[in-house]
Image: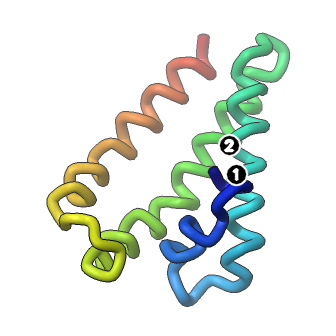
Amino acid sequence: MHFLRPDIFGRIVPPALPAPRLLVLLSGAAEVAGGLGLLLPATRRWAAWGLLALLVAVFPANVYMLQIHAQLHIPAWVLWARLPLQPLLLWAVWRVGAG
């Protein structure tokens, strides 16, 4: 969806960051590359490190999304519930990359 509807993701890029559309496209490309990299044993470890970095890098967007939840028409509780999923995703990527 990063490539099909970048405007949706661009709305959650914190305003302090430059070039929201470019950041959305780059993060989408990183997700695809990381996911593909996890499939191959030869690239799995590097892909996991890249995805871990990506998850950390996009966390501010998740926090910003919570701050502007009313503008996005998303209940705050949904976004609060989403924040603790980040450590679980980090753990899952770490486990796959270490395997």
Q: Secondary structure at mark 2?
A: helix
The residue located at (75%, 61%) in the rendering is: 25
> Pointer 1: what residue?
28
From the top left corner, tell me how far across and down residue 43 is, in percent: 81, 22
The residue located at (59%, 73%) in the rendering is: 10
Report the number of numbered marks.
Answer: 2
Q: Residues at badges 1 and 2 in contact (C-beta under 8 Å)?
A: yes
From the top left corner, tell me how far across and down residue 24 is, in percent: 68, 64
The residue located at (62%, 83%) in the rendering is: 17
**Relative height, residue 16 to residue 45 (above, below):** below
Q: How far apart, in angstroms, are the residues tagged by discs 1 and 2? A: 5 Å
The answer to which quarter of the image holds residue 35 is top right
Q: Residue 31 bears which disc, if any?
A: 2
Is 11 in front, or is 66?
11
Q: Secondary structure at mark 1?
A: helix
From the top left corner, tell me how far across and down residue 72 is, in percent: 35, 74
In the picture, the quarter occupied by the C terminus is top right
Q: Residue 54 bears which disc, if any?
A: none
Structural crowding at the residue carrying mark 2, measured as other residues with C-alpha within 10 Å and reported as few (<14), some (14–19) or many (≥20): some
Q: Amino acid at mark 2?
A: Glu
Q: Amino acid at mark 1?
A: Gly
- The colour scheme used to paint the residues is rainbow
Taking the view exactly as shown, the residue that stands out farthest to the left is 77
